[in-house]
Structures are given as structure tokens and as C-alpha cells.
Image (tube, rainbow, N blue to C red):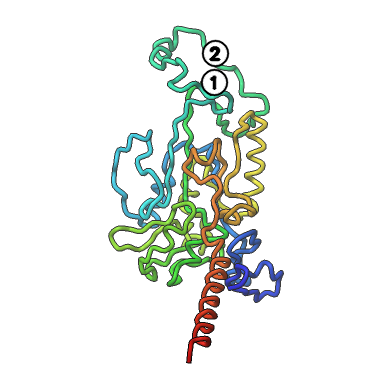
Amino acid sequence: MTDGNTTALNAAGGDPSEARNLLFGPLPNVAQASGYADAPPRMGFFTDTSVCIGCKACEVACKEWNAVPEDGLELTGMSYDNTQGLGASTWRHVAFIEQRRPLGGGREPEAGGGGFDAFEAARQLGSTPSTAPDSAPAGAPADAISPVSPEGRTELRWLMSSDVCKHCTHAACLDVCPTGALFRTEFGTVVVQEDVCNGCGYCVPACPYGVIDQRKEDGRVWKCTLCYDRLGVGMEPACAKSCPTDSIQFGPLDELRERAATRVAQLHSAGVTDARLYGESPDDGVGGDGAFFLLLDEPEVYGLPPDPVVTTRDLPSMWKHAATAAVSLAALGVAAFARRPR
């Protein structure tokens, strides 16, 4: 392992920089770097949270297709979110975040509601003239679902987002797996072979997103496979197939990135200036995600790390320092042995 390279496979004879499985930095062809000489385009998810309605059809479809066991019913009091997060038995998780903030940005109300009395407002419904605008904001797309309330209410909003494994370009879970249970597919995704996993759990702390998880019953790890079996026969993943609003979009990653950039421009022109992409950049700390998002607020609001970095990034330098220390100790031992009194 030198300079972060673990393999150097390029059967197609292309650009050598695309054939190395780097531990950090941009990696244009992740499947080719893993040994697939004639790999198809990298596939992934683009989740547009501005059109997510929180129906949880994706959660149900994921469980049904992949035979993921139920994860218990626990009333958390966190709005309509009773699954709380991703786990060994929750490969798709729809988050509900309630905010007292306008959808289109602007000043956040004061703590405690800023004097707004929801019950008084409810009593006044129908007895006071409506202050709702007669038309959509200037620049809003006419043929798409607007994230702005059609009634103009701006005192409360729900942020909903369907989270999933990010299928990182630099997947630390895969790098630290000692058995090869985790592997890169020809589609650029990362999949667990449950019959190979020995339950060591090294991959769990290695994931910068906290996605991969061990099942208590057998100790093995489980996570989204991006429906590898469906991709193999030309079908889209079950969650994307079931999404009624196309919040979850599936396709070649390059096309999804272009589509996402266009969508962000549309939202900005509609006055939703907080719209931003998360995980789409190949220059970020994990080399770009195979599953990225359009968010309407800071990543932390959705429970996502603001600047994730692949946890194996510093392994080469750590091994160099360890090797230097070992050689120095060996040299000192030899010197001490040579200079001992005879």
C-alpha cells in the first residue's frame, strides 16, 4: 500500500489515475478501480427532499423486497418519526423535522413561538380575511410541485427526508473489512455478503455517516444494497420505484448530478435560497456519495454530518509512522547489542 493506493487494476488500459483504488480524493471511475474493466455507468440515488411528503412508501418497499425484519414499534414523540434512524433492520428511514420557520427562508421566529398563539389562530379561521397570496412566488416553476405552502402559511414547516446508505466513493467500511464480506459492485455500489460476514464489527465505527449496523440476533452487519439483485436484471431499486413524488430518483450518477443542479437553480429562482446539495461533490471528504440529497436546511438539521471524511484517509501516513518507529526501535536494539561489554 503506497500513497493511499490499495490496488492498481486497469485491464482496459485507460487512464492510470482511474484504475487506482485511492483512499482519499476524487476517483472518476470507482468500479474500474475495483477491477471491473467494462463496468456500466455508476448508478445512484438523488433524493430531492423538497418534494418528499413523508409517506414512507420507500421504507415499506425496502422491507418487502429485501425481507428486512420489522424493527419494533416505539412511539418516540418525534413528530411522525418512530424509526429514529438507519439501522440493521431499517435500510430506509424517513425523517420528520418540525421547524417554526418559513419554507422559503427568512427570519426565524423567536424562541417560544415569538408570541404566536396557534390555538387563537385556529379559532380565528374563517372569521378573519385571509392573508394568503393569490399566486405562487415569482419565478416558481409552473409544472412542478412547489415547496412553498399554497396557502402562504409560513409559521411552521416540516422537513422530510428519506435517508439511506450513501454508497461512498471511498467506503471506509469496505476498506477495513477483513473477510471481504463488503465489496464494490460493477455499478459502483457497496454491498454486504451476509454469508461471509463474521460479525467483527470493524466497519461500524469506520462509517462516517453511522449507517452500517450489527443485528443483535446474529452480530452480522446489514445495510442498503441499492437492490443489487434488481439492478442486475435492469430494474430500479424498490424504494425509488415506490416513491409517488419522485423524491427518490435513481439513475446514472452523472445524470443525477446534472438534474440536481437544475433543480437547485429552480428552487433558488422560486425564492427557496436555502436549497443546497449534499454529498454530490467528488471533492468532498468521501470523494462524493453514490446517494446524495437536495436539502432545505443545514445537514445537521437532518442528522447528517456537515463535512464527512472517510475514516481511513490517514491510514497510509499512520502506517509510515508506525514503520518508522519500528525501524528506529530495531536499530536501537541492534546498537545496544553491538556496544554491550564483552
Visible residue check, residue 189: no
Total number of numbered discs in the rendering: 2
In the picture shown, does residue 232 fall above or below 74?
below
- The picture quadrant where one finds residue 152 is top right
Give the residue type that dot 2 points to: Thr
| Location of residue 165 in the rendering, given as x and y in whole percent from the top left corner | 48, 53
| Location of residue 270 in the rendering, given as x and y in whole percent from the top left corner | 64, 29
In the picture shown, does residue 198 fall above or below 305?
below
In the picture shown, does residue 105 fall above or below 258?
above
| Disc 1, SS | loop
Q: Residue furthest front?
A: 341
- Considering only order in the chain, which callout, 2 or 1, is on the residue closer to the N terminus? 2
Visible residue check, residue 115: yes
- Label 2 neighbour load within 10 Å: few <14, some 14-19, many 20+: few
Which residue is label 2 attached to? 131
Give the residue type that dot 1 points to: Gly
Res. 335 mark: none
Query: Depth check: 149 or 274 in front?
Result: 274
Q: Are marks 1 and 2 in contact (CB under 8 Å)?
A: yes
Q: Quadrant of the N terminus?
A: bottom right
Which residue is label 1 attached to? 152
Give the residue displayed 66% in from the left and 41% down from the top: 262
| Location of residue 25 in the rendering, given as x and y in whole percent from the top left corner | 63, 59
